[in-house]
Image (tube, helix red, strand yellow):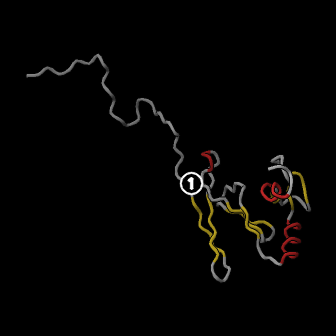
Amino acid sequence: PPPGLLCDLLWSDPDKDVQGWGENDRGVSFTFGADVVSKFLNRHDLDLICRAHQVVVEDGYEFFAKRHWITLFSAPNYCGEFDNAGGMMSVDETLMCSFQILKPSEKKAKYQYGGMNTGRPVTPPRTAQAPKKR
């Protein structure tokens, strides 16, 4: 999206090394520190912000700002490149959050060639003679 509110809502990222606002390595929008999260939560009488749109490698979810901010990423092995887990968050009627971790399945190449010793029977060469009938 063009620069502005929508762009910043989608592309700004938390950064534990930033206080206030900073430049974003993605080349779009900003980074922000835990102090920005705290001010926003207090101003709007909220306890938690849950967001996505950023790969989280370890468990598919990651806390920030003393557990008042959580990033969820639910696509395990994103694009076949990150070997990341996915995370799902459930919220019960008492607002207790619980998490399920979606581990990536084993990586498999789209087109795999293992050479001659792959455990498959070898196709006989064309020059082989057919057995004679009796």
Name the spot of residue 95 as percent of width and height, x first: 68, 80
Query: Taking 41 as reference, is 19 above or below it?
Result: above
Q: Which residue is painted at 64% across and 69% down in the image? A: 89
Q: Which residue is mark 1?
A: 104
SS type, badge 1: loop
Q: Which residue is painted at 67% across and 55% down in the image? A: 57
- Judged from this view, the residue extending furthest toward the right is 20
- Judged from this view, the residue extending furthest toward the top is 127
Amino acid type, mark 1: Pro
Q: Which residue is painted at 62% across and 72% down in the image? A: 90
User: How many discs mark residues in the rendered view?
Assistant: 1
Query: Taking 115 as reference, is 29 above or below it?
Result: below
Query: Is the C terminus in the top left, top right, bottom left or bottom right quadrant?
Result: top left
In-image side of 123 versus 83 (left or right): left
Name the spot of residue 45 as percent of width and height, x first: 83, 78
- Judged from this view, the residue extending furthest toward the bottom is 94
In-image side of 113 versus 5 (left or right): left
**Which image quadrant for residue 14?**
bottom right
In-image side of 18 versus 120 (left or right): right
Question: How many residues crowd mark 1 within 10 Å: few (<14), some (14–19), many (20+)?
Answer: some
Name the spot of residue 81 as percent of width and height, x first: 63, 45
In-image side of 119 versus 100 (left or right): left
**Which image quadrant for residue 9?**
bottom right
Query: Taking 90 as reference, is 107 above or below it?
Result: above
Q: Which residue is painted at 53% across and 52% down in the image? A: 105
Name the spot of residue 62 as percent of width and height, x first: 71, 63
Residue nearest the viewer, comparing 23 with 46: 46
